[in-house]
Amino acid sequence: MSDTEKAKGPVAIEKLPWKEWTQGVRYGSRYRVLSDTRGEGRKIGIAYEELPPGKQSAPFHYHLFEEEHIVALAGEATLRLGDQRHPIKAGDYVAFPAGQRAGHCLVNETDAPFLFIIIGDRELHDVCVYPDSGKILIRGLDGSVMRHGEGLDYWEGERADERIAEEAGS
């Protein structure tokens, strides 16, 4: 198939199906995928998202290798960014550069939905840090989640006190 045959024209956002998710009573949203990084050779993921009243968009987090952007379309929410809280409303834009060690999430404390576009590059080998819960996620290791701060000594388990000859004789 040629590149011309693969090319797609405009897509009506309202015709794309909604996908919904929730976790407990705190987290949840619904979204429409505009660009998916899984397949089709795309590097940038884009979603049209609706954050319902009383919900948080995701656990408070930051990425070491992934970049994210938000464009607010309708309604209002609160952006937690590091140790600050900022109102975010239609027409606002915010970026979260890779490696910026300031957690972020959206919280809808109003009685109306908050609508926004989220854009990210979905790095395959990202490390995501969750300051509120003290966890880290390492995407390149099949999404392993570990408790931050429970680090091991670099030499742990490396048999530093065994001679090479002892290993060869086993």
Image: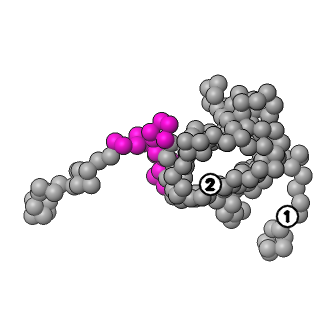
Of residues 140 and 99, the one drawn nearer to the viewer in this rendering: 99
Q: Is residue 21 visible?
A: no
Residue identified by numbered label 2? 96
Q: Is residue 3 above or below residue 17?
A: below
Of residues 103 and 17, the one drawn nearer to the viewer in this rendering: 103
Q: Is residue 117 visible?
A: yes
As drawn, is 144 to the left or to the right of 74?
A: left
**Tag 2 secondary structure:** strand
**Tag 1 secondary structure:** loop
Q: Residue 63, image x and y in percent?
A: 54, 52
Instruction: Give the total of numbered labels.
Output: 2
Q: Residue 27, image x and y in percent?
A: 64, 32
Which residue is rendered at x = 12% and y = 64% of the image? Answer: 164
As drawn, is 108 to the left or to the right of 61?
A: right
Q: Which residues are magenta?
A: 131-150
Residue 133 falls inside the magenta stretch: yes
Q: Amino acid at mark 1?
A: Lys
Mark linked to residue 89 = none
Viewer-nearest of labels 2 and 1? 2
Residue 66 falls inside the magenta stretch: no
